[in-house]
Amino acid sequence: MLFALKTHVRRLYPLCHLYTTAASTITASSTWGETEKKALIDLVNRSYRGKIKGDWDAVVRNIEQTPTKHYRRWTFDEVRTMAEMVQTEFGNRRLGAEWQEIGRRFGRSPSSCISNYYRYLHEQKDAISNNQFCGDQELVEQVSSVIDKHSQDADSKGVVAVDWHAVALETGNPILDILESLNRMLQVHKTKNDATQSHYQIPCVPIIVIQQLLYPQAWLPSHIQRLQRLVNENQDQMIRLNIQIVSLFMGIDQRSCALALDELLEKKNTGIAAKGKRWAKDETERLRMAIKENGVDQTWDLISARVGTRSAQACYSYWHRARNEAAIKAKNNKNIWTAEQLARVTEMIWNKRRSSRILPLVCKLFPDMSQVEARLLVKKCSARVTSLRLSKQLTQDQDTLVKCVDEVRDAEGNIDWRAVGSRMQAPPALCRVRYGEFVCKKMAHVRWSAEETDRLIWAVDEQRRILQQQGQKIDWKFVSKMVGSRTPTQCKLKYRGHQKLSAFCK
């Protein structure tokens, strides 16, 4: 009733108190049925319709649509049925507009369904916690009766060291279950105990073991062997083997146990300390299966526990190094791509003119190629296309290149190719190659004639006579100018070959 009138509260504000008082005799009942609906509708039609301005048809419509069980209390069976239905159809995901449909199914308002559902879940969680506590208390009481037989003084301060293997053998429970129960009882003891008395009766012997922990300056060999035995026996359950459990097992503070456990895992089970130790095939297979099941978004500690013989850092490093294996292979092997692949990708880049849009097309064109290999292929073809375009530009602007080189050449004949590249807007090395090709076109590419050889020998002798006075090396550019039809490189190679032939004939 009140929900129906809230839409008109601004118009009916002066009469809201009167209306609530008049309707209190109806809403005080434990049920909200058709009789109450008709009585309220008659009250609205008799006392308010036509006397107060407003959309009373909407009010009556809202009253008629109100569920008949809206004000009736929920029974435990109804709440349980509703909770089971929600968990069956929707699981544990968070609901929104679905509560409207749930309310219509059970004849209740959505807010009532929400509050009762989460109250039911909270009560079930408390019941599970109480059952778990009772089980932990029974297990710890059973352990406490056995623990005196297998305890020995490990220090002059009266610290108790427990032989947990003997305790587990006599009680018939795994060591990790015993230590986890003891750890949970300790948390309850810390949170719910007062300074003088405890709400829960925890056996005194395990509390002595927990509270009086060793703070050793150095670990004894017996301590290390004991920790190593615990790790070896629980290789498949490394996730459960946290620092609290290790501290309870060893009777040593958590910080020392954490440092010792990390050192033990690095020395024994990882490839970090033992550098150069290669991954075995079974380790690699376990790593791939763990990543396939958990994904790289999960914590690497879980993946390391699944591998069993490597730390989280070793798994992370090896996985990312393995992902770049194709890239390393591509860099070391220049013939990883076929001529057809190079030609097709080069043509695509030449036509598209943007390599960033080529990568998806290359991946679709060659599905067997990894994304790393495809990216390297696109990068190589892009460099090739850039070189081809610049070469084409320099070939077309050949006269401009020659003119630029003549302007940059100094008095001694040296050329600043960086200045040439900046003027031509091309790499200096490419400008030098194109200029060399242009010069070589004017030179002879046939066998050396006798006249050319004589001019070469005369030019070198003349150059040596001049350089003996100055103490410098032979300037092959000067020799090339003296010969007239050969490049400096051709002159140098020919003269060296002539010297070797003369020495052999002698």
Image: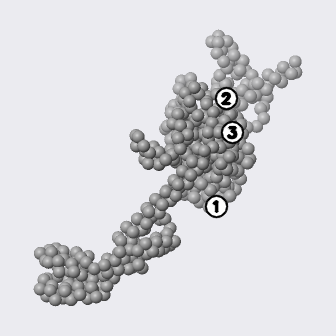
Residue type at the position of mark 1: Leu
Residue 65 placement (x, y as % from top left) = 31, 83
For marks 2 and 1 on the same chain, the one whose residue lies earlier in the sequence = 2
Q: What residue did someone put label 1 on?
A: 365
Q: Secondary structure at mark 1?
A: helix
- Residue 233 sits above or below residue 484 on the image: below
Q: Quadrant of residue 260?
A: top right
Observer-nearest of 304 and 459: 304
Asked if one can make out residue 131 in the rendered structure from this viewpoint, the answer is yes
For marks 1 and 3 on the same chain, the one whose residue lies earlier in the sequence = 3
Of badges 1 and 3, the one in the foreground is: 3
- Residue 409 sits above or below residue 290 on the image: above
Q: Quadrant of residue 106?
A: bottom left
- Direction from residue 305 to residue 134 in the image, left or right: left
Quadrant containing the N terminus in the rendered view: bottom left
Q: What residue did someone put label 3 on?
A: 229
> At x 51% / y 45%, what residue is drawn?
202
Residue type at the position of mark 2: Pro
Asked if one can make out residue 258 in the rendered structure from this viewpoint, the answer is no
